[in-house]
Image (cartoon, helix red, strand yellow):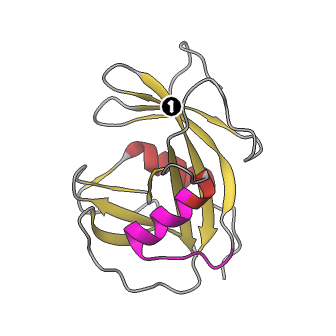
Amino acid sequence: MSDATEQPLAVDHRGNALTAFVRRAEERPPGDAPLPLALVALWRGDRVLMVFDRFRQGWELPGGLIEPGESPRQGAERELLEEAGQTPAEPLRFVGYPRFALAPDQRVEYGALFSGRCAEVAAFEPNEEIEAICWWDLREALPGRVHALDACLARLTHGLHRPL
């Protein structure tokens, strides 16, 4: 984990920061701050799935709040299906716990980051939250803003899976 004197791994346009990435067992989440969200980096070859969030007006990893009674893994699987209509080719791999300091008050919270591979791309239907999806190669420009924290987390998972 990082302390206040270390540089964040990434900062977004609103001042939210990815301050650390904690690699530990899935069943041992950090206990020093809440863990309200789960995120998924779903890969197809060398491209990661990004969703365009209508409200935040930018490209980000699929994910969101963990619902009451859900595990972080269950929340990640649900969000991936709800937001992008995609399912992984095999069970998601737990990667670690990103630690965030959220603007404006620098409130600290964690997410649970999962990664997986996509064998077949399912049809996508825009919904209330997500306008579009794309498979991003991390180097190309996307139309609109790519959220810096999500781009950093995608890079952390790059290369974890063999191509199908």
Q: Which kind of residue does numbered mark 1 sit on? A: Glu
Specify the quadrant that holds the N terminus: top right
Element marked by disc 1: strand
Q: In which quarter of the image is residue 15?
A: top left
Name the spot of residue 142 as percent of width and height, x first: 30, 62
Specify the quadrant that holds the C terminus: bottom right
Q: In the rendered image of this protein, does residue 132 appear above or below residue 98?
A: below
Read off the residue under disc 1. 109
Name the spot of residue 147 as percent of width and height, x first: 36, 48
Badge 1: residue crowd in 10 Å (few <14, some 14–19, many ≥20) = many
Asked if the magenta segment contains residue 17, the reply would be no
Q: In the rendered image of this protein, does residue 5 appear above or below residue 69?
A: above
Query: 158 left or right of 141?
Result: right
Name the spot of residue 149 as percent of width and height, x first: 44, 43
Residue 141 in sight: no
Q: Residue 9 versus residue 104: which sits nearer the camera? A: 104
Asked if the magenta segment contains residue 79, the reply would be yes
State how many labels appear. 1
Q: In the rendered image of this protein, does residue 9 appear above or below residue 160?
A: above
Query: 25 left or right of 84?
Result: right
- Give the residues drawn in magenta, as a range: 75-90
Give me the residue at 37% from left, 31% from top: 16
Q: In which quarter of the image is residue 157?
A: bottom right
Give me the residue at 22% from left, 53% from top: 57
Query: 2 left or right of 129?
Result: right
Residue 35 in sight: yes
Name the spot of residue 81 as percent of width and height, x first: 46, 71
Give me the residue at 53% from left, 57% from top: 75
